[in-house]
Amino acid sequence: MRPSIIARSTIIALTLVMMGSSAASAASVEQGRRLAVVYCMKCHAIDKVSPSPLRIAPPFRSLHERYPVETLQEALAEGIVTGHPTMPEFRFDPDQISDFLTYLKSLE
């Protein structure tokens, strides 16, 4: 095979992988947003502009300013428990955690 054919084939393959990854990432963000709507929207702002309905609940768009959102991974798996009684305890499965964190990162 000639080098130019190999180079073109490699470029095409990498482009397809990146397009697939981009589509998967967008689907992950959307699934994470759906989880936020179901479990969190009653108290937290889940978009880039709205205030949180519950004043003590930080908006998701600013969580990364307090700490790296990756640190939530263990808490989401084991059950988030906070110092205030109004936040329900819940657990996500590994795919949900990945989607939810991808969504949170998209708000940064």
Image (cartoon, helix red, strand yellow):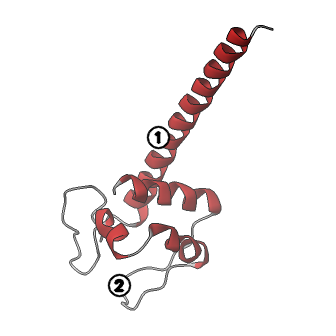
Measured as percent of width and height from the top left, residue 38 is found at 41, 60
Q: Which mark is residue 47?
A: none
Question: Where's the N terminus, which quadrant?
Answer: top right
Label 1 Cα neighbours within 10 Å, binned few <14 / some 14-19 / many ≥20: some
Measured as percent of width and height from the top left, residue 78 is found at 60, 78
Marks 1 and 2, the one that precedes in the sequence: 1
Residue drawn at (18%, 66%) of the image:
51
- The quarter holding residue 63 reads bottom left
Q: Which mark is residue 86?
A: 2
Disc 1 target residue: 26
> Residue 2 vs residue 40: left or right?
right
Residue type at the position of mark 2: Thr
Residue 21 versus residue 10 in the image, above or below: below
- The quarter holding residue 17 reads top right
> Residue 106 vs residue 57: left or right?
right
Residue type at the position of mark 1: Ala
**Secondary structure under the numbered disc 1 in the rendered image:** helix
Residue 101 versus residue 10 in the image, above or below: below
Residue 106 versus residue 26 in the image, above or below: below
Measured as percent of width and height from the top left, residue 100 is found at 48, 59
Q: CA distance from mark 1 to mark 2?
A: 32 Å
Label 2 Cα neighbours within 10 Å, binned few <14 / some 14-19 / many ≥20: few
- Front: mark 1 or 2: 1
